[in-house]
Amino acid sequence: MKGIEVRSLDKNYGDVRALRNVSLTFEENKIYGLLGRNGAGKTTLLNTITGRVFPDSGDVLVDGEVALENDKAQQKIFMMSEKNFYPEGMKVKDAIKWTREFYPGFDEEYCRNLAEKFGLNTKKKIKSLSTGYGSIFKLILTLSANAPYLFFDEPVLGLDANHRDMFYRALLEKYSDKPFTAVISTHLIEEVAGVIEEVVIIKRGEIIRNQSVEELLETGCTVSGTAVAVDSAIQGKTVLGEDSLGGLKTAYLAGEIDSSTLPAGIEIGKMDLQKLFIHLTNE
Amino acid sequence: MNIKSALKYQIADGRVSIPVFYLVIFCLMALIPISASGMGPEDSMSIGGFEIATIIFLFVVGLNSFRETFRMMVQNGVSRKTMFVSFLLLTLVLSVGMSCINEVLLWIGKAFTAGKGNITFQSVFEQMYAPRYMGNPDSIQMIAEGLLFTILACAATMMLGYFITIMYYRLNKVGKIAVSVGVPAILIIGLPIFDAVVTGGIIYRALGQLTLFAMGILSGYNPYYAMVSALIAFAVLASLSWMLARRAVVKD
């Protein structure tokens, strides 16, 4: 079977249950958003899949092969971590050289072009890069690795709006050129909402949602209009959140709403992923 | 494929330190003619022990071969097993390579000092096992045995450095402090006092005898005892290192 299959993963750090019976599949050629609050277990999940930490129980299969301590399986994954795993004294160009050595599919020309686009100086030492350029360096390596499964853990940490936009564009261009599986773990939900197809929401180590963004957004809707009209329309409904500006209001509702019962001047819109996320992950 | 890449990476890691090491050795050797020119007929000079410098160098290489390499390997999808096997190969490559270079340096040194009766150029191996080669110095047997001895000593010492660094990596803060303070305290203070006061010197005498036995000195200056001892030490340290490395996890 193609894809990454996670089966009943459990991981504890002392008294903290970082992962609880996590089972999911990252299918081939899809872009996933791995969403969760701080400490929800996103990084632990990715670290466990890539063998950086050991699970207490459970298995991970990559294309049907056990992933733990399996070079062949791990070579199919490239993970961009929030932390730097490269020797601090190493230069960017040397990191590129060594990634090419370990990942034979590494596209050096693409990497150099991307570095030029982002303005990354490849002669610099990794430790001398700013937070933003540290992220850019890792992003470029990940996109250039040409592995079938790419993990991005907080990929836009420290990036300005222009660089963030460039990253999302580069990701989508690469994906449309030759599809792969991308898992993006991030807090910036609004930004990735337009990029991801599938969403996995993790809360206190448990997967609470694992479905397509479209399906998830269909579980709710927005109701907009004048404050008075909206207030009357949402009476008795499960309200996930509200935004008000002047006399106008938008309410985020769980479940569907019958438009024929609504007063005039009320508009029904698509649910907002971030609002839904906040509702689902609130303690 | 991965083992080859991992080995290449680890060899490349020493691409600066190894040439610098030999540059220093070369400079030291270049000082010999200068020192010799100032010697009078009554003076004598003994030069050697470069293999001890190599052994210490490889111990330090072992000490520096885990943390950064482990993170780099994990980042690049290399398993702990592959990383460990590549380190074993690195140990082999460096021990054999540097021991051979030492042998060549020894040969050059001897060639330069030949005929100068008051200057002797000897390896530590020759000095230790001199009685075995009495009347037959510089024989093929002595060169081969010396080379084998140095290779195994280098490998065991490098593995000792590797074991120490992994042990420290795996220990928590309290464990690190306990080992850093406890081991020297026992070896430098506790054991000598205990041996002197309680056991009347038996422990140190036994340790001395054990060392002489392990080095083959008690068995007619037989270097094969030392080689087997080094091989056993290497095997034990490698096994312990693997037990620690196989469950190592990435730390922030």
Image: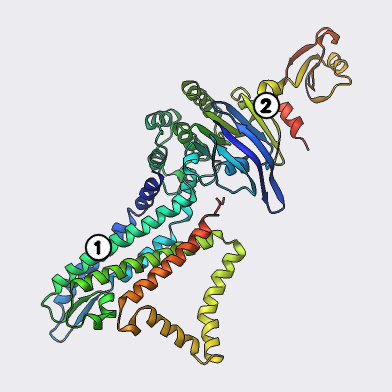
Between B162 and A222, the one nearer to me in the picture: B162
Residue assigned mark 2:
A211
Which residue type carries mark 2? Gln
The quadrant the N terminus of chain A occupies is: top right
Count every numbered label the image shows and give the total: 2
Closer to the eye: label 1 or 2: 2
Which residue type carries mark 1? Ile
Q: Residues within 10 Å of mark 2 (few under 14, many from 20)?
A: some
Label number found at residue A162: none
Q: Is residue B148 above or below residue A251?
A: below
Quadrant hosting residue A193: top right
Q: Are marks 1 and 2 on the same chain?
A: no
**Percent position (x, y) of residue A167?**
52, 28
Q: Residues within 10 Å of mark 1 (few under 14, many from 20)?
A: some
Between B241 and A7, the one nearer to me in the picture: A7
Between A201 and A50, the one nearer to me in the picture: A50
Residue A136 appears in view: yes
Q: CA distance from mark 1 to mark 2?
A: 63 Å
Chain letter for mark 1, please.
B
Residue assigned mark 1:
B101
The quadrant the C terminus of chain A occupies is: top right
Chain letter for mark 2, please.
A
